Amino acid sequence: METEHVKCLIIGSGPAGYTAAIYAARADLHPVMYEGMQPGGQLTETTDVDNFPGYPEGINGPQMMIDLRNQAERFDTDVRSGWVTEVDFTGPIHKVIVDGKKEVTADAVIISTGASAKWLGLESEKKFRENGGGVSACAVCDGFFYRNQDVVIVGAGDSAAEEATYLAKLCKTVTMLVRKDVFRASKAMQHRVTNTKNIKVLYNHEATEILGDETVDGVRVINNQTQEETVLPATGFFVAIGHKPNTDIFKGWLDMDEVGYVQNVPDSTKTNIKGVFVSGDAADKEYRQAVTAAGTGCMAALDAERYLASLED
């Protein structure tokens, strides 16, 4: 098996990984980045990004990731296609296997593998996700585009309730589809939903099809108790059934919560393994924004730089 040693290895791309690369490269850490299964991360599935500082006219997600990559490469970050399939963090020198065929060792590792939104799996959902026509998994990111319009949101937990109340401030009406006859959300979040006048909750309802040609104009739903079908007029469809952090390869090595988010040492990006740092949505289940991911990418690079300097003392 081919082997290689690097000073600083970044696993995953996206705002966190590219920002970590920019800072690490400027600190002469000569970072090597493996982009992972989805180069550029979740933002490559987003059409318009209006809330990232520095883009007064907005920018589409894929172009923003190209800009970040170009900036990282400008400072000589070695950006590579490849997927880390296995890790070994037993010793002071950290080992990873790339694509099952190459061994890379590193003095410091920055994890920026992100998280993936859970989707319903509808064919129509996939169609609109691919053409950017009204399906989203982030109300904070995309709610702005649906001001004074009717939207539908799927979910029953705290995140769904929070996103619904956020959308209610912007949208004309918000219809929540709850698969069972009760919320999973906390009582406080339930009260917030029920006390918001323009939120309507449909219990025992599921989406079966998102309607429209180029953009969403309605949602077909079914009452799973009576089998009665209804079409809800809507221009936006939000899915809030959770995210899955892309951290499976680190299980058994890094401390994680029950969902799989990597747990960092408070006020730092350090993990329980010396020389391994985490940034972005792989550790963040609270904010999940491009700008917060970029911030933690910066922090991870600074932490890695200080760690590597301590080895030389």
Image: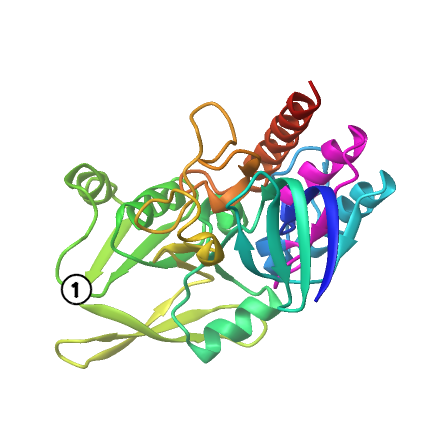
Residue 23: quadrant of the picture: top right
Which quadrant is the N terminus positioned in? bottom right
Residue 215: horizontal and vertical position, in percent?
Answer: 55, 68
Comparing 169 with 238, the one in front is: 238
Q: Which residue range is magenta in the image?
A: 16-40
Residue drawn where x is 48% and y is 48% of the image:
143
Which quadrant is the C terminus positioned in? top right
Residue 203 in view (yes/no): yes
Instruction: State left or right for residue 220 relative to residue 227.
Output: right
In this figure, which residue is indicated by the disc labeled 1? Answer: 180
Q: Hey, what amino acid is under mark 1?
A: Lys
Up the image or down, 177 lies above or below 195; here it is: below
Residue drawn where x is 45% and y is 53% of the image:
149
* Magenta highlight on residue 283: no
Crowd rating for badge 1 (residues with CA inside 10 Å; few <14, some 14–19, many 20+) = some
Up the image or down, 215 lies above or below 269; here it is: below
Q: Furthest-top residue in view?
A: 313
* Magenta highlight on residue 32: yes
Residue 115: horizontal and vertical position, in percent?
Answer: 49, 53
Residue 302: horizontal and vertical position, in percent?
Answer: 65, 26
